Image (cartoon, rainbow, N blue to C red):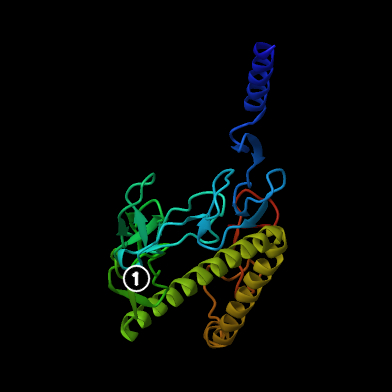
Amino acid sequence: MKTVAILCLLVTLLYLVSCCEEETHYRKQDKCCKKCGPGKRMLVDDNCEDPRCQDCKDGEYQSGYTNKTKCERQPSCDPNLHFQQQMNPSKTSLSKCECKPGYYCTQYDDCNTCREHKVCKPGQRVVTKGSPVSDTVCEACKNGTFSTQESADTCKEWAICEYGYDKNAPGSLTSDRICVEGRPTQRGVIVVGVVVLLLILIAGVAAILYMTKRHKCWKKIKLPEQAPKIAGLNIRLHQDADVERAIQQPEEVDEINGPVSPTPSNVTENGNVVEQEWGKEPVYPSAESNSNSYSHF
C-alpha cells in the first residue's frame, strides 16, 4: 500500500515539473508561478498565479520574462569619447551607445571607438555623407567646375564671359573664372567692323536688285521703235547741213551768175547763148541724135 502511495506522489511531482514552462514560469515551493513579461520587473511575488509587475524606468531594460524585482541598466555613454545614448532607447533590449554627429563607429557590432568624419576639401564635393556607422566619401570636382567651401554638396560651373567681356583669370578646382569688361577700343573696332560688313551686304543686295530690275526694263524696250527717232535725227542733221550750205551758197552763185561771154561751147546754131543753171549737170549736144536733143552725163 505504501508503494502505491509513493508511486502516485512521484507521478504527481513529475506532472507538476513537466507542466511548468521555464521561459514564462518559475517554480516556487513546488508550485509553477508566472513571470513578468519583457520590459517589466516584479514588485512582490506574493501572488504566484497573478504577480504584480511594473515597467522598467528610463535607462533600464528587461529583455525577457523574469521574476526579478530590478531591471537591467542601459550602458553609460561617455560624451568625452564622442559617444551618446540612442534616441528613445528600448526597454526590452540593450541599446548600445552610438557616436555623436560628425563621428562614426569603427566597429559596427561592438562600437568602442568613434572617429571624426572626413572633411571634403575645397575643390572636392561630397559623394556620400557620413553616418554613425560609415565615413564620408569625397571626390574631386570635374573639369569646368569648382568648390570653395569644405564639404560642399555640389561643384559649381565656371562663369561664361559674355560678349564684350574678356577672361581675366582662368577657372580652377577652387576658384571661378573671372571676367572683366573689354577695352573700349577693341569693342569699338568690333562694332565698326560689324557695321561696315552690314553696309557692304546691304549695298550688294541693292546693286543686285537694281541690275535685275534694269535688265527686265531693257527686255521690255522694242528696238524698231527707236528707228523713227534715229531717222528723224538723221533728217534733222541733214536739214541743218542744207541750211548751212544755203547760207554759204549766194556768194558762189553771185560769182557764177554774172554776165556770160559767148564762146563756141555755149552758143547755139541760132546764135543764142546757153547759160548753165547752178546745181545742174552741163548739157552737151549729142552727135548721135538727129534732132536738137541733149544727153546728160
Name above or below for residue 180 compared with residue 160: below
Q: In x, y percent, where is residue 47? A: 69, 48
Q: Residues within 10 Å of mark 1 (few under 14, many from 20)?
A: some
Front in this rendered view, residue 258 or 162: 162
Q: In x, y percent, where is residue 100? A: 40, 63
Q: In x, y percent, where is residue 186? A: 32, 80
**Which residue is at 66% across, 14% downward?**
2
Front in this rendered view, residue 134 or 265: 134
Q: In which quarter of the image is the N terminus?
A: top right
Name above or below for residue 23 compared with residue 282: above
Residue 258 occupies quadrant: bottom right
Name above or below for residue 18 compared with residue 237: above
Left or right, 251 with respect to 193, comes to right
Left or right, 120 with respect to 199, comes to left
Q: Name the residue under label 1.
A: 149
* Residue 277 visible in the snapshot: no
Residue 226 occupies quadrant: bottom right
Q: In which quarter of the image is the C terminus?
A: bottom right
Q: Which amino acid does label 1 sit on?
A: Gln
Front in this rendered view, residue 156 or 288: 156
Q: In x, y percent, where is residue 294? A: 65, 58
Front in this rendered view, residue 37 or 78: 37
**Which residue is at 39% across, 62% downward?**
77
**Which residue is at 31% across, 83% downward?**
183
